[in-house]
Image: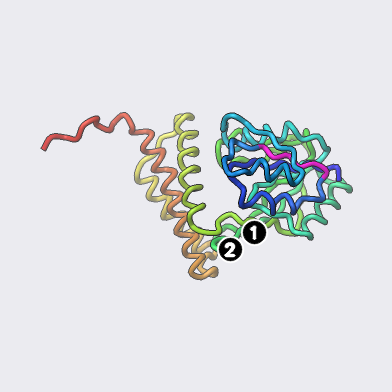
C-alpha cells in the first residue's frame, strides 16, 4: 500500500504492539518516540516500525509534524498508540487510498472507558480527520487538542469506526487531564488570555449539562454519568489552571500574620 502510518509515543509499551499489528497492511510505519523508559521503541522496532527518538517535547501538534516530515508515501494515516484499525476500516482505507477520490478522510472513532464503549456523552459520533495525502495537510501547532489542517482539496468520510482504547481504568484519564489542563492553560496564558473563577465554575456546569442531557450521556448509565462528571472536572481544571497563571504573582510569599 502507498501508505505511511505515523504514531507518536511515550511509554506506550502496553499499547504499541496491538496498534502496529492493526496497521500491518501499510507499507511504512513511523514511530516518533519522546524518550520512553518502558521499552516502547524496542517493541516497535521488533514489529517492523521505523523508530525515531526526539530529545525534547514540543507539544502534540509539533511532535506529530515531526513524524509527518519523515513519511515517504503518498498517503498518511495518523494514529495514537491506544487506537486500533479493525479489519473493516483497514479495507476502507485501502480502497480510498487506491481510488483517491478525495484528498483527506475523516474516520468515526469509538472510545472505550473502563471496559465499556461510550456511545453518547459527546464521545460518539466523533469524526476525526486522520487519513490524508502527504503534502496536502499538516498538524496545527497546538500543544494539546491538535488537529489536521487541510491546505488544499476536499475531505470525505469513512464509515467503519476507529477503535480507541484510551482509558482502561480512571488513572490514565486523571493523568491526561492534568497534562492537558496545564498545557492548554500555558498556551492560552502565552496568548494573553485571562479568566475568572466564575468562568471556571460555569464551564464545569455547562460541560456537564451539555454532555449528560443534550448529548444523551444518561443513556450510557452509570459509566455515562462518570464520563460526564469527569468532563465537567476537565472543563473546570483547564480554566482553573489558567486562573492560577493569571494570578500567580498575587500569591503572597508568606502567610499573613495572625
Q: Nearer the viewer, residue 219 or 10?
A: 10
Examine the structure image and report whether residue 224 is included in the region drawn in magenta: no
- Comparing 203 with 231, the one in front is 231
Q: Quick check: marks 1 and 2 in contact, CB under 8 Å?
A: yes
Q: Residue at x 55, y 60 (%)?
A: 113
Q: Earlier in the sequence, mark 1 or mark 2?
A: 1
- In the picture shown, does residue 112 fall above or below 156? below
In this rendering, does residue 1 appear at all? yes
Q: Position of residue 234 (x, y in %)?
A: 46, 50
Q: Is residue 76 above or below residue 229?
A: above
Can you give x and y, in whole percent of width and height, for residue 54 in the image?
A: 62, 31
Q: Going 65% across and 33% down the picture, which residue do you hit?
A: 53
Start-end of magenta stretch: 27-32
Q: Residues within 10 Å of mark 2 (few under 14, many from 20)?
A: many
In terms of image quadrants, where is residue 154?
A: top right
Give the SS element for disc 2.
strand
The secondary structure making up most of the magenta span is: strand
Q: Kindly identify which residue carries mark 1.
A: 110
Q: Position of residue 14 (x, y in %)?
A: 61, 52
Give the position of the C terminus as an image quadrant: top left
At label 1, counting other C-alpha atoms closer than 10 Å, the crowd grade (few under 14, some 14-19, many 20 or more) is many
The residue lying at 46 percent from left, 34 percent from top is 186
Q: Taking 118 as reference, is 76 left or right?
A: right
Q: Locate residue 136, reporting x and y percent.
A: 77, 35
| Separation of residues labelled 1 and 2 (CA atoms) | 7 Å
Instruction: Indicate which disc residue 118 carries.
Output: 2
Residue at position x 76%, y 50% from top?
A: 23
Answer whether residue 154 is visible to the viewer in this image: no
Element type where label 1 sits in the image? strand
Amino acid at each position: 500500500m502507498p501508505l505511511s502510518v505515523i504514531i507518536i509515543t511515550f511509554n506506550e509499551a502496553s499499547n504499541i504492539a496491538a496498534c502496529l499489528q492493526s496497521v500491518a497492511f501499510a507499507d511504512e510505519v513511523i514511530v516518533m518516540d519522546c524518550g520512553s523508559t518502558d521499552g516502547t521503541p524496542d517493541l516497535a522496532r521488533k514489529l517492523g516500525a521505523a523508530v525515531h527518538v526526539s530529545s525534547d517535547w514540543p507539544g502534540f501538534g509539533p511532535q506529530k509534524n515531526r513524524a509527518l516530515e519523515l513519511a515517504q508515501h503518498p498517503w498518511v494515516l495518523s494514529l495514537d498508540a491506544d487506537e486500533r484499525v479493525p479489519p473493516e476500516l483497514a479495507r476502507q482505507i485501502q480502497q480510498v487510498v487506491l481510488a483517491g477520490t478525495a484528498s483527506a478522510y475523516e474516520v468515526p472513532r469509538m472510545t472505550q472507558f473502563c471496559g465499556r464503549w461510550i456511545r453518547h456523552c459527546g464521545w460518539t459520533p466523533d469524526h476525526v480527520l486522520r487519513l490524508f495525502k502527504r503534502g496536502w495537510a499538516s498538524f496545527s501547532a497546538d500543544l494539546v487538542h491538535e488537529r489536521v489542517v487541510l491546505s488544499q482539496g476536499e475531505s470525505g468520510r469513512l464509515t467503519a469506526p476507529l477503535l480507541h482504547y484510551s482509558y482502561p481504568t480512571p488513572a490514565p484519564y486523571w493523568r491526561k487531564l492534568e497534562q492537558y489542563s496545564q498545557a492548554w492553560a500555558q498556551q492560552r496564558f502565552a496568548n494573553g488570555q485571562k479568566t475568572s473563577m466564575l468562568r471556571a465554575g460555569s464551564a464545569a456546569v455547562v460541560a456537564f449539562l451539555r454532555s449528560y442531557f443534550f448529548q444523551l450521556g444518561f443513556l450510557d448509565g452509570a459509566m455515562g454519568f462518570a464520563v460526564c462528571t469527569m468532563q465537567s472536572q476537565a472543563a473546570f481544571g483547564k480554566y482553573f489552571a489558567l486562573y492560577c497563571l493569571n494570578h500567580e504573582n498575587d500569591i503572597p510569599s508568606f502567610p499573613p500574620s495572625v
